[in-house]
Every structure is written in structure tokens, then in C-alpha cells.
Image (spheres, rainbow, N blue to C red):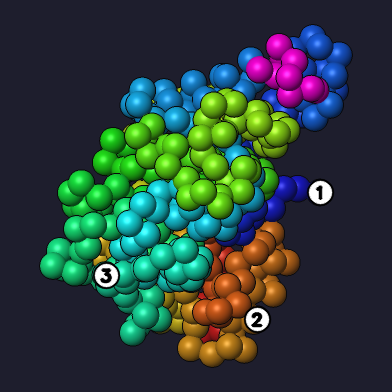
Amino acid sequence: MARVYNFSAGPSMLPEAVLKKAAEEMLDYSGTGQSVMEMSHRSAEYEAIIGSAEALFREVMEIPANYKVLFLQGGASAQFAMIPLNLFKNKKCDVVDTGTWALKAIQEASRYGTVNVVATSKDKKYSYIPKLDKSTFSKDADYFHITTNNTIEGTVFSDLPDTGNVPLVADMSSDILSKKYDVSKFGLIYAGAQKNVGPAGLTIVIVREDLIGHALDFTPTMFNYKIHAENGSMYNTPPTYAIYIAKLVLEHIKSIGGLDAMHKINIEKAELLYNYLDGSKMFKAAVAKGPDRSLMNIPFMTASEDLDKAFIKEATKAGFVNLKGHRLVGGMRASIYNAMPVEGVKKLVEFMKAFEAKNA
């Protein structure tokens, strides 16, 4: 069977070059006579893999030396608790409410302290990034939280807020490695791997060293950044195979020219789809034209649920899978992460044009 174009919001496509390399090494990694899946995480061979993965993250993302790179588990959802448990001193944080995942971060942090929602776009179903007023920021907040790219709603922060001495914390799950961010502007970055980094099961945390070592006294051992940092992400058995795939993904990104080259490709893909949607009489983008539009997740819809269902059904038969929108918003969504080739978006647009002509 031919490979399909997978527009899933996650787990998502992986680069074919990565899958082929992993297949080649499945039974015998680097002459060890075993798969990475079978390898002891304490072995010299695996320590080389995880060391290489960290070094590649540092190189590709240009991570300063005073930041730790942690390979954890529990998804971004576990970080909603780990962040306040580790960063709360005054037990207060500022959050920008831009959608479903930001709201989950708010709800979890509220269990441990006070959350000041400095702005929200809930009034228009999170279809835009709200303007920020510095007068609403808390000077004594322990951190300021944003979700850089909103997977469900299809919005993105085009400008980072200036939070002064308050550490900026970012859920970067759906746009990490899609473009270059200045890591030094953040106190902490976290991301589930299953969109742009690798398979589900791995969570990346990049945290400034001065923010480590202040966990609340009732923080579970496994939720303490200090424990993981001191043990090189080896306090318990890490998600070994997912880290190995992440290493291959980073090697692939490096081979095509790094994050600047990746960003150019992502802009090209997004423009192909947005330009069609903006000119279509049948399909409409959920987010208005402008800087708030995500390059990674593009929600769209027709004028009727029946037509949406017919489109999804026909698209799936044609090899364009997982285009159904999130259950909370409906419609369709094309998640065009790093691994989605330009050709995949071009063919999707061609299919949409044909569907529109047939159903006009």
C-alpha cells in the first residue's frame, strides 16, 4: 500500500528518511546486534545516543550553556503540574489564555497557587491572539506562561511578550523545531515530541539552571526538575526509542540546513493552503488573514456539517487522512508539521479544488 498524506495533529508524520534509517537499524544498531528498543539505557551504546540527542538539540536550537535539556515522560500535560510545582515561590503566575491547552495549564496551576489571566481570546472561540497590556502583568509572578502555537484553534504568537524579570514559560508542543526561537528569552520551554520531534511518549523540557532546585516541598520525586537534571534524564528508564528517533529527526533537520531552512519550507506549505482558502467560495479558514495564523495547524470549514463530512470521507479515500477537526471545534484541520512535504500540501489543494468544482 502506498503511504498516505497524514494531516494528524499528533502523533504526526515523521520524515521518510528518518523512518528508513530507523528500519535499517531496527535489528542491529551500529553493530551491537540488537535494536535500540532492546538496549539497556545504562549501556555505553545508549549513553552515546542520548548524549548525541542532547548535543543536537543544543546545536540546532542554539540553546545557551546555562540551560538544561531534559528528556521526560508524561506529555505536556504533566508539565502543567511540574511547572508550578518547581517554579512557584510566591505561588503566583501570569497566563495568556489562547485556547484549550492554555486553559488546561491554567486549571492545573490553580491547584497550587494564584493564576492571573492577563488576556484571553475566548470571546471569539480563541480564533485570535489577544493584545497584551503590560499593566495587567504581575510584577511578583513566578512565571509568565504562553502557548506559542495553538494546535486546536490554529493560532500562533508572532511576537513574544516582554515579561521583564519574570521568566517566560512556553508550551511549544506544536511548533518546536519549526522555526528559530531565541531560547535565551525563555525561562523554560516544554514540548510533547509527537508533532515535530518524534514518537509519542517523550517530552522535552529546556529549563534555565537558576530555575532548578526550588520545588515545593510536597513535589513528587518524579516531578522534580532537580532530580532529572542531576541524573542526566536517567533517574528512571527514559523513553529510549523515542529519544533515538528524536536524534534522527534532529540529524535530518541539520542536513537540510537547520531551522532557517525548515521555516522557509513551512512558510511555503502554509501559504499554498491559506492562499487557496482565501480565494475559495466553499472553504473558509477559521483564523482571519494576518499574523495570528499558524504555520503548523490550519483549521477550515465549509458552510455545512454535511459537506464537511462528505469532504473528510472523500479525502480519506483519496489518501489524505486525519483531516477531521478537533471534536471541540468541528470542521477540518490540516496539520502540516515539519515532516509534511510540500508535495503533500500541493496535492491536498488540488483535491480541494476538484471537490469544490464537483460540489459547487
**Marker disc for residue 102:** none
Q: Mark 3 points at which residue?
A: 118
Q: Nearer the viewer, residue 166 or 315?
A: 166
Label 1 residue SS: loop
Label 2 – label 3 distance at C-alpha: 41 Å
Q: Which of 174 and 204 is in front in this view?
A: 204
Q: Which of 230 and 285 is in front in this view?
A: 230
Task: Classify residue 18 as left or right of residue 180.
Answer: right
Tell me the residue at 86%/14% (across/down): 33
Look at discs 2 and 3 and give the one toward the viewer. 3
Look at discs 1 and 3 and give the one toward the viewer. 3
Task: Classify residue 347 as left or right of residue 289.
Answer: right
Is 140 placed above or below 45 here? below
Label 2 – label 1 distance at C-alpha: 24 Å
Label 2 residue SS: helix
Q: Name the residue under label 2.
A: 310
Label 1 – label 3 distance at C-alpha: 50 Å
Estimate how packed mark 3 is, as few (under 14), some (14 to 19) or many (20 or more) residues with alpha carbons within 10 Å. Answer: many
Cβ atoms under marks 2 and 3 closer than 8 Å: no
- Check if residue 308 falls in the magenta segment: no
Instruction: First in sequence, mark 2 or 3: give its number.
Output: 3
Q: Mark 1 points at which residue?
A: 1
